[in-house]
Image (cartoon, grey):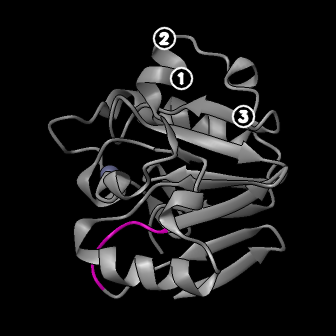
Amino acid sequence: MIRKIKPNILQFYFENFGSCVYLLKINSKEILIDTSSREAREEFLEDLKKTNLQPEDINMILITHQHWDHNGNIDLFKNAKIYDYKNLIKNKINPEQTQGILFIEIKVIHVPGHTDDSIAFLYRDVLFSGDTLFHNGIGRTDLPESQPEKMHESLIKLKNLNYKILCPGHV
Ligand SMILES: [Zn+2]
């Protein structure tokens, strides 16, 4: 299913279990935030078709964290540059200097807690929070890869951002 968040931002959400996917069009580049699960693959492809896009048209994928329900369809997008915690924060890659197409307007925030590799993205007044923050609660911190002691600080970071619309990893 498709929901319009802004003229250049769509949300895809699915019957089968999997994360939401967000499609952003910025400077005529097609950017995905997360790719949902294998289980949601067919629905995702259907939705993509309805937007008149082919998987090859996607230029960039931003991954909020490497959980299977968020990264399950990365392999569909042969022309996309993939960005996650490791190649953005850990290796200190400055998005503004990458490939020329990156998303000068997208701010990347490291928010460990749900996982140590969780990142959030702020685009103008829209916050993409992955599994750190939901509309009615916060993400799990009892997983082996969680860092529960860091969750509070991460939530404060998000709270201090100037956003109006929350786009979480699950609805
Ligand atoms: Zn997760």
Residue tagged 2 = 91
Residue tagged 3 = 102
Towards the viewer: 58 or 88: 58
In terms of secondary structure, where does tag 1 sit? helix
Question: How far across and down, in percent of the image, does residue 167 sit?
Answer: 62, 63
Q: Which mark is residue 88?
A: 1
Q: Of marks 1 and 3, which one's residue comes earlier in the chain?
A: 1
Q: Which mark is residue 160?
A: none
Q: Residue at x 67, y 73 (%)?
A: 10
Q: Amino acid at mark 1?
A: Leu
Question: How far across and down, in percent of the image, does residue 108 sit?
Answer: 64, 32
Question: How far across and down, in percent of the image, does residue 161 sit?
Answer: 76, 41
Q: Are marks 2 and 1 in contact (CB under 8 Å)?
A: yes
Q: Amino acid at mark 2?
A: Asn
Q: Is the residue indicated by label 3 positioned so its CB lies within 8 Å of ligand 1?
A: no
Q: Which quadrant of the structure image shows residue 168?
A: bottom right
Q: Is residue 128 above or below residue 166?
A: above
In terms of secondary structure, where does tag 3 sit? loop
